[in-house]
Image (cartoon, rainbow, N blue to C red):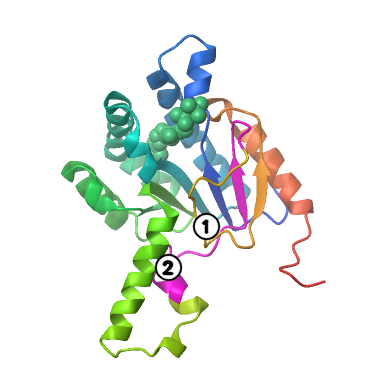
């Protein structure tokens, strides 16, 4: 068990590189995703041990719906399996689970599994695992703007009442703090429509390790590095 001094309260991760991992080994992409799902378990555990209180994972983006049908099916089946088999383990480890994203796009049984996991784990307080599923940050921001416009149209608020706090409260992430650290695996250095509003002051960390190979050691090394950084939030 690794102790990290001043761990980030909230870590967000873009789990990238499953496909390349499989390709490098001459395996089908689906195997990369399967290995990727195993890496998820290890990292949730490592985060809890390090004292991270919120972990947000990008499991499926709104853009991922455009992947070939069989790949979308593989990912949905993996998620289905994960959601339906994890309850006991999550309970034992004190994990509270939350989902962000456009739920309506998902299959009914998946939505049901999500709702019941959220309900059953609501009182756990070791760590909150937030899974971004069918998530797109621009879509999230537009939907927040629509909610605010509707309130203004009804006369419930005046345009001058709109501030950062109100806007944040209209996002899927209204109940959790902003990420302190965003990690992306696999060597790509972009944000890909992930938590655009929420990462305003997050520290960014990019690693060349592909997601299925990303383990506790790599994770803890990034946390150690983070703890040495000085965050100034625009001040001197
Ligand atoms: C990116 O790799 C990864 C994804 C699109 C999906 C992430 C999903 C998992 C890790 C598995 C299930 C998740 C949970 C929470 C159980 P990529 O396919 O874009 O890889 P590539 O860029 O190398 O092609």
Quadrant showing the N terminus: top right
Residue occupying the point 42% across, 63% down: 141
Task: Specify the quarter for ligand 1.
Answer: top left
Residue 22, visible in the rendered structure: yes
Relative to residue 19, is residue 169 depicted above or below? below
Residue extending furthest toward the left: 108
The answer to whether residue 206 is left or right of residue 211 is right
Query: Would you say the beta carbon of the disc 1 residue lies within 8 angstroms of ligand 1?
Result: no
Q: Residue at (31%, 27%) from the top-left corner?
A: 68
Where is residue 28 drawn, in percent x and y? 40, 14
Highlighted range, magenta: 167-188
Image: 45 above or below 20? below
Q: Residue under label 2, please give it.
A: 174
**Relative to 33, is 54 on the left or the right?**
right
**Quadrant where the C terminus is found in the figure:** bottom right
Q: Secondary structure at mark 2?
A: loop
Give the residue at mark 1: 196
Residue pictured at 29% horizontal, 90% vertical? 155
Q: Mark 1 falls on what kind of element? A: loop
The residue positioned 52% from the left and 34% from the top of the image is: 16
> Which quadrant would residue 98 be assigned to in this image?
bottom left
Residue 225 location, x and y as percent? 75, 46
């Amino acid at each position: 068990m690794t102790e990290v001094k001043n761990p980030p309260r909230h870590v967000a991760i873009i789990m990238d590189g499953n496909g390349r991992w499989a390709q490098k080994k001459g395996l089908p992409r689906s195997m990369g995703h399967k290995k990727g799902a195993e890496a998820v378990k290890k990292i949730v555990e490592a985060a809890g041990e390090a004292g991270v209180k919120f972990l947000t994972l990008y499991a499926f983006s709104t853009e991922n719906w455009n992947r070939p049908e069989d790949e979308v099916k593989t990912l949905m089946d993996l998620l289905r399996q994960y959601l339906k088999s994890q309850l006991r383990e999550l309970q034992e480890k004190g994990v509270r689970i939350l989902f962000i994203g456009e739920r309506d796009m998902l299959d009914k049984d998946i939505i049901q599994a999500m709702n019941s996991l959220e309900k059953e784990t609501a009182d756990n307080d070791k760590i909150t695992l937030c899974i971004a599923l069918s998530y797109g940050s621009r879509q999230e921001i537009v939907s927040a703007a629509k909610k605010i416009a509707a309130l203004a149209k009804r006369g419930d608020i005046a345009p001058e009442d709109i501030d950062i706090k109100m806007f944040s409260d209209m996002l899927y992430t209204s109940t959790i703090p902003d990420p302190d650290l965003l990690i992306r695996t696999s060597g790509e250095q972009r944000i890909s429509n992930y938590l655009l509003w929420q990462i305003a002051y997050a520290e960014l960390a990019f690693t060349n390790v592909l997601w299925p190979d990303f383990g506790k050691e790599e994770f803890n090394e990034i946390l150690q590095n983070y703890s040495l950084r000085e965050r100034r939030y625009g001040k001197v």
